[in-house]
Amino acid sequence: MDMPFDAQNDTSDDALLIAFGNGDRLAARVLTDRHAPRVIGYAARLLKDRAEAEDVAQDAMMRLWKIAPEWRTGEAKVTTWLYRVVTNLCTDRLRKKRGTGLDEIAEPEDGKPSQDAVLMQKQRVAALDAALDTLPDRQREAVVLRHIEGLSNPEIAQVLDIGVEAVESLTARGKRALAKALADQRETLGFEDDTA
């Protein structure tokens, strides 16, 4: 049976989305497998709630499937489009939640290293998440997209609908604020102090 793409090869996101828009359900599965875990991870960092993050990711993917028939190659990357939708959905949820003051620490999923390593990693993630929570929303979004999700500055600019210079400013200020917030925890978190 001929398929419009070879799922085993590195088929572009655009080609997969267009294939889905033309009725190929396997293309949707490949795109979902490729992007859903990272989208869920990004949403979980913003929302601090894995179940809500999964709901947001599902909503974002459904929106992607809905626009697939009209997708125009070259206007935006599928990943950039997805991160922008997830950012907006998370922002909407956070605005609705602002008054409830949930003070939960999200537990990261991890392998089975030693218990000490697991505990230290949890402390580091909790400290990072707590420090990220002190940043203004736009700084937090920019820092997470750049340094945790690995997007480029131009991609982040598209996601957040701002200029590249604004992204650079947000990430630089966010990194400085995080470094300052975490400075007194270096030893507790198991980081060696390089200054002697």
Image (cartoon, grey):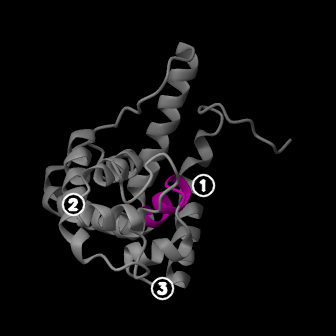
Residue on which the image places disc 2: 23
Residue on which the image places disc 3: 163
Is 146 covered by the magenta stretch? yes
Residue 179: assigned label: 1
Query: Residue, x 20% and y 49% (percent of image)?
Result: 101
Residue 100 picture location, percent across and down: 14, 50
Query: Residue, x 24% and y 77% (percent of image)?
Result: 70
Distance between the alpha carbons at the discs numbered 3 and 2? 36 Å
Residue 73 picture location, percent across and down: 40, 78
* Element type at mark 3: loop
Residue 15 horizontal side relative to residue 53, left or right? right
* Element type at mark 1: helix
Q: Nearer the viewer, residue 19 or 129?
A: 19
Residue 90 horizontal side relative to residue 118, left or right? left
Q: Is residue 191 above or below residue 129?
A: above
On the question of residue 22 being in view, the answer is yes
The span shown in magenta is 140-150
The quadrant of the image that shows the C terminus is top right
Q: Nearer the viewer, residue 52 or 70?
A: 70
View extreme (top): residue: 114
On the question of residue 91 being in view, the answer is no
Whether the residues at callouts 3 and 2 have beta carbons within 8 Å, the answer is no
Is 20 covered by the magenta stretch? no
Going by the numbered disc 1, the residue's amino acid type is Ala
Which comes sooner in the sequence, label 3 or label 2? 2
Going by the numbered disc 3, the residue's amino acid type is Gly
Q: Nearer the viewer, residue 115 or 74?
A: 74
